[in-house]
Image (cartoon, grey):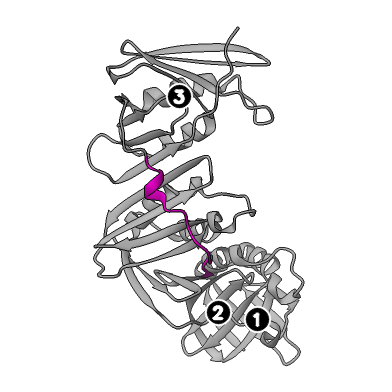
Amino acid sequence: MKISCLRTDLVSAVSNVSRAVSSKATIPALEGVLIKAYGSSLNISGYNLEIGITTDVEASVKEEGEVVLSARLFLEIVRKLPEEIMTIETDDRMVTYITCGKADYQIVGMSSVEYPDLPTFQQTDSINVNAKVLRDMIRQTVYAVSDNNAKPIYTGSLFEIADGVLHIVAIDGFRMAIRSENVESESNTSFVVPGKTQQEVLKLLTDDDATINIIVGQRHITFRINSYSVISRLIEGTFLDYRSTIPVSEKTELVINTRMMIESVERMSLLNSERVPSPVRCKFNDNEIRLSCASAVGRASDEISVPIIGESVEIGFNNRYMLEALKNTDTDEVKLVLNGPVSPIVIKPVKGDSFLSIVVPVRLANEG
């Protein structure tokens, strides 16, 4: 193999692809990136047997070929090269020569035969989604994906398409996040995408109007994002019937400034610790929210004046869960709906149904 290309293009490509590379793998080749030079481009792939990221970089290919290089070392070398045009050449023993200006490296590569094949699968469905829309939908739900492998199905989000609407649903047993957007699709399908895969997709998505193509198979999925493809297995299993868990009654409701509520909960959080979390106590009564928190280090309280419709209620919640739900609404105001002290807290938009978050309450001990 012998090629030349722009260093900046290669830095970006290797940096992004390397996120799918195993840091410690039983197969040594999986700690590297696979480089293939054919035609007029350089194809670069990273794969950890769960997620694969691949992309093409424009290159002048003088001799076609393939090699696997240490992802960490190759990226550091390319980052430190002094000029823009660089050349990469490999010999029959897979020794790879990297030259840029007066800088010259020789590093030991591996044969591409040792690199596992990325998954190939038969397409069962295809969906096109606006890049900004998909980015917002994933960002506003992936925080609620479970990190507990006891129930693997909830370590991913449900992608559900029905009647031209895409729903993304994440549940971890303590909260739920739902985002819904209209899409141009006649599909009626659902599948569960791992949270880790969504995090990688999120890093590649940009705030523009590009169209993202999602290719779905029986057990795998590919997100095509500009010049990148993210390939992942899907999670198999039965996802919760999430609609049945959404409270239908509204005993207490109020519309509140999102930033005001966030700041008040953050003030209560100052006395909290991750090791021994104390719930934030919230009393909704007489057009006022009274928040308080008591922990081993002290007590704090705060009040917010806001019109409240319906019954008075006192409820407790985990401060982190509430803050993550509020911060991912992206709206100036939200509607809070409550149905007593042990029923989930519902957070939704003042108008429409683009998102819905549920936070399961914490049972409160009586204050002495």
- Compared to residue 248, the image places residue 25 above or below, namely below
Q: Residues within 10 Å of mark 1 (few under 14, many from 20)?
A: some
Q: CA distance from mark 1 to mark 2?
A: 9 Å
The boundaries of the magenta stretch are 232-246
Q: Quadrant of residue 10?
A: bottom right
Depth check, mark 3 against mark 1: the one in front is 3
Task: Please give the label number shown on residue 116.
Answer: 1
Q: Quadrant of the C terminus?
A: top right
Q: Circle 2 is placed at which residue position? A: 119
Pick the front one: 193 or 238? 238
Q: Position of residue 224 (x, y in %)?
A: 41, 71
Q: Residues within 10 Å of mark 3 (few under 14, many from 20)?
A: some
Pick the front one: 336 or 26? 336
Residue 56 visible to the viewer: yes
Pick the front one: 225 or 234? 234
**Secondary structure under badge 1?**
loop
Task: Please give the label number shown on residue 273.
Answer: none
Dot 2 amino acid type = Pro
Q: Circle 3 is placed at which residue position? A: 341
Residue 210 visible to the viewer: no
> Residue at the location (75% across, 74% down)?
28
Q: Quadrant of the N terminus?
A: bottom right
Q: Is residue 263 left or right of residue 74?
A: left
Query: Along the polypeptide, which appears first: circle 2 or circle 3?
Result: 2
Q: Position of residue 238 (x, y in %)?
A: 49, 61
Dot 3 amino acid type = Pro
Q: CA distance from mark 3 to mark 1?
A: 53 Å
